[in-house]
Amino acid sequence: MKRNVLAVLLTAVMTAAMLAGCGSGSGAASGGSGDGGEVIKIGVFEPLTGENGGGGSQEADGIKYANQVYPEVLGKKVELVIVDNKSDKGEATTAATRLVEQEGVVAVIGSYGSGVSIAAGDIFKNAKVPAMGASCTNPMVTEGNDYYFRTCFLDPFQGTVMANYCTQQGFTKAAIVYQNGDDYSTGLANFFKASFEGAGGSVVSEGVIQTNDSDYNSILTNIKASDAEVIFAPSSITVAGAFIKQARALGIDALICAGDTWENEAIIDVAGEAAEGVVLSTFYDENDASASEEAKKFVPGFKEYLGGDAIIPAVSALGYDAYCVVLDAIERAGSTDGEAVRQALADTSEFVGVTGAITFDENGDAQKNVAIVKTVEGGKFKYLDTVVVGE
Amino acid sequence: MGTQVLSVSDITMQFGGVVAVNNLSLHVDEGEIVALIGPNGAGKTTAFNVITGVYAPTNGQVLFQEHLISANYPRGKMKKKYLGEADTADKYHVAKSITPDKITKLGVARTFQNIRLFKNLTVFDNVLIAKHMRSRANFLSATFRLNHKEEKQNREETMKLLEILDLADVKDEIASSLPYGKQRHLEIARALATQPELLLLDEPAAGMNPQETDELTAFIRKIKDDFRLTVFMIEHHMDLVMEISDRIYVLDFGKLIAEGTPGEIQNDQRVIDAYLGVQKDA
Amino acid sequence: MSKKTKNICTGIAILLAIVLITLFDRDVIGNAYVKRVLNLAAIYAIISVSMNLVNGFTGLFSLGQAGFMAIGAFSVAIFTVPAEYINSIFYLEPMAPWLAAIRLPFVAALLVGGLIAAGLSLLIGYPVLRLKSDYLAIATLGFSEIIRIVFTQMQTITNGALGINRIPGITTMWVPFGAAAICIGIMVLLIHSSYGRAFQAIREDDIAAEAMGINLSAHKNLAFAVSSFFTAIGGGLYAALLTSVDPKQFYFTMTYNFLLIIVLGGMGSVTGTVIASFIITGGLEWLRFFDEPLTVMGVTIPLFRSGLRMVVFSILLMLLVLFYSKGLMGQKEFSWDGMYAWCKKIKGRLSGLSKKKGGA
Amino acid sequence: MSMDIFLQHLLNGISVGSLYALIAIGYTMVYGILLLINFAHGDIFMMASYFMIFAVVDFGLPVWISLPMIIVLTVILGMLLERSAYKPLRNAPRMSIMISAIGASYLLENLAVYLFSGVPKGYPDIPWLTKVINVGTISFQTVTVIAPVLVIVILGALMALVNHTRTGMAMRAVSKDFETARLMGVRIDRVIAVTFAIGSGLAAVGSVLWGAKYSSVYPLMGVMPGLKCFVAAVFGGIGNIPGAVLGGIVLGLGETLLVAFFPGLTGYRDAFAFVVLIVMLLVRPNGLLGEKEADKV
């Protein structure tokens, strides 16, 4: 009897789920297309769970804060519609369709992790909904897609930045470690290798880290044997902390460096003292003296929003900027029509954001040629250098 | 006596240190009903399992008609322990054993001590499945129903078989819902559907009352004649065994201790001892 | 219910389905989001039914669906991605020239993927299918991981971790729904053929099945290969639906989705599986509200935040197995008689309920 | 390859292998008794790591109190899991139990993501485990040496338990023949509970060593070790405790040396375990130390 009741209950819930899914689906389509509504909806397309859940949440925080600071455009309230793409392409495309069709968003911001952005790109393009990437650095995100823009620099640039930095420091022997199956990591490692070798250095050891594996000792021992002076190991934060710690425990004292993902407190939390001296490239530094007024306003405000004195992650700042750029474009377009907003975005020139002035090139990429290099010192991320790369 | 249908020579079956069957040799001739009896744990079912290919024997060989079912004659150090010689002397170690399905295809069908029906399928399907083996259709032609003639014929034959065996009225029942006696019948029906020449019955009367046992006796006789079978069975019901068997083999602790007609076996002291549990020359 | 009534019912149902799909397809009802969810459900139905063919009908516990899907998905991705995009997609290392020279139509690429998957399944099936079913579970799971890892490494063929995008997409709902009808139709025919009966015999009792002359290894391999074939077809459709694939998607936890579907639908029931595919795919979308902050009367309930949906999902799976292990249909199939009886029962219960209420 | 580098690799291999061994014992014992792949075992290991973080970081307890506490907590979790997910299915088809195990594993993972977020947390520093020792050019943490020694001690204790105590005898009886043991008056549920307790306890011990060595804790950390350790258990002969230890160490060494000698194959490291599994099933399905068993007909 108990089972029967449960059975009926389960079936009822499931059927209701099905009906609700479809029912609300057809309902929203008729009323949702953005224009004329009481509010303007902007989609936030971020991984809140899954492999990139950590970074995605930070980026979403920046966007949410920006929404709090600038809650209105064209005299209407801006409503954020946050969907979780779970760092998974299958989920991502459905979530993206949901934003575009179901929620009727005017524009989309995201995503952390380029893979999901690439997967969803065509959906935004076909629906003529402009999308603004905040930290998706893969070249393929915007290429051939007029509707995708981004506020950050690209993988090739980032790889080059670190390679240049290493060459400047006089290193000639580098080891590269990247993460198996991670497009970001693989991309950065390849571009680093190309520039580093181009500048006369040599890559003496290459290692591949397995996702969800915690033991990097064998790769590190190979690196130890190769006498590399510097280790370039772009990887997710899940890997980073443990990697650094194991390297130091093996007695490797080479410089360890990576890309923007490493600017995350979790790494210092995991690696502890071993994290000291690690170098990484990033988009933004909260203590940048030459920063704009906007940035100076942003830093204390956002810290208060987060409630704490933790360092502001670059992706949060980028998320903030992405929101502001989109809002600015809607303002200038004077409407929420997708094509008009896209045109306004493409015309954006020297928009002053937290992470610098933003102008989009023909691909829709922010023309940034400056990267910040940071290091870990005393358990904190410290500004180290600014690297400018000529195009 | 007719030709030998089944010939078992020097079969030994060891599980680790346990010798379940020890140098068993026997034969079953065409048209006979032969019984294999013995106390519990004597190795009867193991012997059946070797004959039907479920186990590969540690030593010895099994022939069905002219087909070699299994043969294994370890050489070298192990040789001393076992009896018999392989036909092919040129090999260091002869081990051959074909899988149960191939043995069934050759014409040996069996039932199981603890009924093994396809429990959640209908009576009809249980029997129809046994026809699959003789089907010439490959999976593609079967999927796209290019074999519908053969399929139709199989269904008709199955129906006929169910009618003969008095199962037609329950053909759409789920097998496990049948009463115990009917399940035994169904198992035999399923075995018959494979068109065997030799039928191995593993305790067909287990759990039956005397009246059911009598019916079973008649039933076995009937199918033996109707289907021109040779029957080799394991049984505990002595009434049944004595009434129906042409010859009887007695197994105790894996060893053959007696062989003969029902009359001879009834009066054999060793058999009596074995059943009563008397310890001889211990 | 007479045969004639049943035929009329079936006819009406099919007609209704066609009309509904046409309406959705033409955007008369619903929108692209609903369409996508339905398409996804149809593709999941193919994969789940093929998983059920092995797990539910043949009684082998296989967990390799994700890997075989990956094969199908990459076959479609590799062979149908337009030549003009190849260079920009393979920007780290160019695609192997011999491969870049082969461009196939969608259907051909699907079939190639299916055949490769079937071939590989035989390769893995041969050693593993002889063993106990738990080994099969872990070995198929391992195999699916091996495929994923190998695909990650084959930079010049699969573009490695970067994956392949700009796969020509599915433009009409008829593609996934038509494919689902054909694939599931073929599997149903197989299940009801004498081979299908042999599969079920193996599930019920493999020793007895072997004693009935069924060659265990040949039949297990056959079921496994057919299942892998259709799983790969489903994977190919999935790739075309997403227009973008990378190996990471096919992490083995993906298989759990299909496991949930067949458990809900009933191990050994095709119609149950199809119904469950739609319920689960729709339900997972619907469950999204679990991930969003819920505010009831001005109070934000702290429980509702991202991640809750998957917790609910896994609890549902557990509850199903523990208390409702037969699923919606058990081993039964949908029939109008069953439907009729069910409606009557529900009606009876409802009237019983209302009577009770009336009494109280 | 120079000698010291080779020794370094060897040391890495043995230490990671010992950790595998600790987890593999849990698998092999549960499988031996219930014929169940406890898919959730790796996730119990993960939860044990989080328990430690909560104890030390959030509650500020000293390590010597936290250690026994998390072992007890993990044991309770393991027994709870058995009670709720496996016991109700004692007479259900094998596939149902396996699905339940997968469900339990998935639930623990998703729960961890929900409760603790996907961001990795640092494992509390336990100085006597993480101290770095330098011998010539070889560097290693104390845990690297402690792990194999601990495994040998635990193996000895377990063998004594299994072979010389009443509980151990009951375990052996249940693993030989479940039904008969039940009829003979062995309290099956108690034996199973003890088995889960031991397995979970060892997973907790493993998690401490693991945490000290790798320091990163995240919800999916148990997945790969879980799968690999099952492979290790199969490799050594499932149901056989020394086999699990042997399998774990061989697998750990194999993985490490694969990377050491064929750096080009590092990308395939995770596939290595599964390839080993398939080859093993092909060549010697009962594992290195496993006995051949005949099916009852």
Image (cartoon, helix red, strand yellow):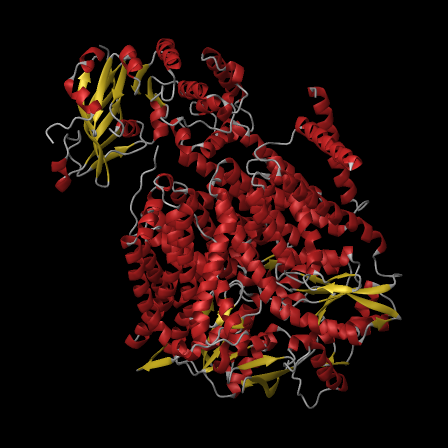
Residue C153 percent coordinates (x, y): 48, 61
Query: So how many labels did they put on this image?
Result: 0
Residue at the limit of the structure toward the front, as seen here: C360
Q: Nearer the viewer, residue A322 or B175?
A: B175
Locate the N terminus of chain A and report the quarter of the image it occupies.
Answer: top right
Residue A359 percent coordinates (x, y): 74, 77
Q: From where the camera sits, is residue D187 visible?
A: yes
Residue at horizontal 79 percent and vertical 67 percent from the top = A342
Q: Is residue A127 left or right of residue D30?
A: right
- Height in image: B165 above or below B126? above
- Height in image: D102 above or below B169? below
Q: Is residue B145 left or right of residue D186?
A: right
- Height in image: B221 above or below A331? above
Q: Nearer the viewer, residue D297 or A275?
A: D297
Residue at the limit of the structure toward the bottom, as seen here: A289
Locate the C terminus of chain A and report the quarter of the image it occupies.
Answer: bottom right
Q: Nearer the viewer, residue B67 or D32?
A: D32
Q: Is residue A253 left or right of residue B39?
A: right
Q: From where the camera sits, is residue C170 visible?
A: no
Residue at the limit of the structure toward the left, as seen here: B281
Residue at horizontal 43 percent and vertical 68 percent from the top = D68
Residue D252 percent coordinates (x, y): 36, 63
Residue at horizontal 73 percent and vertical 36 percent from the top = C17
Residue at horizontal 71 percent and vertical 20 percent from the top = C4
Residue B58 percent coordinates (x, y): 22, 35
